Image (cartoon, rainbow, N blue to C red):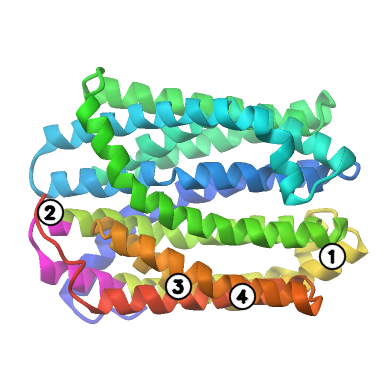
Amino acid sequence: MPLTSSADRAHDRQILRLAVPAFGALVAEPLFLLTDTVIVSRLPAPALGALGVASTVLGFLVGLCVFLAYGTTAAVARQIGAGDVRRAVRQGVDGLWLAAGVGLVIIAVVWPLAPWLVHLIGAEDEMARQAVTYLRISLLGVPAMLLVLAGTGVLRGMQDTTTPLLVSVGSFALNAVLNLVFVLGLGWGVAGAAWGTVLAQSLAAAVYLALLFGRHRAPLRPDPVGVRAAGSAGIALVIRTACMQVVLTVAATLATRMGQEQIEAHTIAIRIWTLLAFALDAIAIAGQAITGRALGAGDVMGTRRATRRMVEWGIGSGLLLGFLVIAARPFVPGLFDAGPVVAGELLDLLWVIGVLQVVAGVVFVLDGVLIGAGDQRYLAWAGLWTTLAYLPAALAVVAAGGGLVTLWLALGVWMAARLITLGLRARGTAWLVIGA
């Protein structure tokens, strides 16, 4: 990637300082899921399909709460840019208490609904039974998952992406070992995969709490006003994320109803897509922290220059990842011990996934920049419009009796709609609001 000026070189250093550790931390999360997938794929059917169904429900729930990381990053970064470190830490603590409360509510509400939810996705009989088992055990780790999200957001807002990297790598290593022991060693099946992830996430949450209340001497008591403010500010991001989760859930539901081989291939493809998405999202995380701090300091021109440079990085990264996907395509089915039908479906899907990486590179960067700017209301409306663009394409797949490739081309329509809505917003000035 060519360097055109000293300003570009300065932005490159800042982007790399934040994005490289963020990349490691971000890919650790989908690696949790990939580890489960690789290990569970060794179990008899329908274990892998059950994992895909339960993970769809769990991903929807946790995905709705990503505002705990994104909103906290933007809020803390603005306060850091304005020079108010004490207020930044206070907002971080409010986010932690909100995360704990939301996690407990999710357990209470979703536990009794687990059988109905997996049936809604399309699971029946033994697949449904195993999916409920995985989902209910995983629910016990949801408060820890949300605390990790909030704690990560606090540190990112403080321009520290190295500590989340170290915590994520440690958690991933522990998760891999526990899953091997529980699933293959002790023979616990999908329940073992769930318990491994719950324990690893719980340890990660404990580390974040120790860091924030120890190193940064954060106040322990919650501020009810601050917690309510954090929840109110996150509503728009919840809507934005809910729209994304609706798209992914509809896709998983349609794939499930196509057949067992199709949901297995779709589950693997989604894991790969998620891994690539988090890799690209590393630049978006840098965008959140850089944009929030720059606007907090009142630097509009610096925000513009950094945004342009991060988009260039997104394009380059998307091209590289797309090439790697297509190059690795012949070897992927063997990694997951896929049967002939699943392997054939997966090989076709990898072409679509590879081509979409360039679009994804730009979309994720602009999404991160606008989140960092606090432009959540626009992102909520954009999420609604792009979901409305996707649903007719998905319904056309059903009406035409299309297969998995057609279903993923409908996801391509969704990504194109996101590119248009985010690109138009970034070219304007309404999102460039300065101050803490």
Q: What stretch of residues is rendered in magenta?
A: 294-309
Q: Residue 355 placed where, x, y %? A: 60, 78
Mark 3 Cα shell of 10 Å, populated few (<14), some (14-19), many (≥20)? many
CA gap, disc 2 and disc 3: 27 Å
In the rendered structure, the answer to whether residue 103 lies left or right of residue 382 reads right
* Residue at numbered disc 1: 343
| Badge 2 vs badge 1, beta-carbon distance below 8 Å | no
Q: Is residue 92 visible?
A: no
Q: Quadrant of residue 266?
A: bottom right
Mark found first going from the N terminus, 4 or 2: 2
Q: Amino acid at mark 1?
A: Ala
CA gap, disc 1 and disc 3: 30 Å
Q: Residue at x 82, y 31 (%)?
A: 189
Task: Identify the secondary structure beneath mark 3.
Answer: helix
Q: Amino acid at mark 4?
A: Pro
Q: Amino acid at mark 3?
A: Arg
* Residue at numbered disc 3: 418
Q: Residue at x 41, y 26 (%)?
A: 101
Whether 187 is drawn above or below 393: the answer is: above
Whether 15 is drawn above or below 402: the answer is: above
CA gap, disc 4 and disc 2: 40 Å
Mark found first going from the N terminus, 2 or 3: 2
Residue 296 - label: 2
Q: Is residue 117 magenta?
A: no
Of marks 1 and 4, the one in the foreground: 4
CA gap, disc 2 and disc 1: 50 Å
Of marks 1 and 3, the one in the foreground: 3
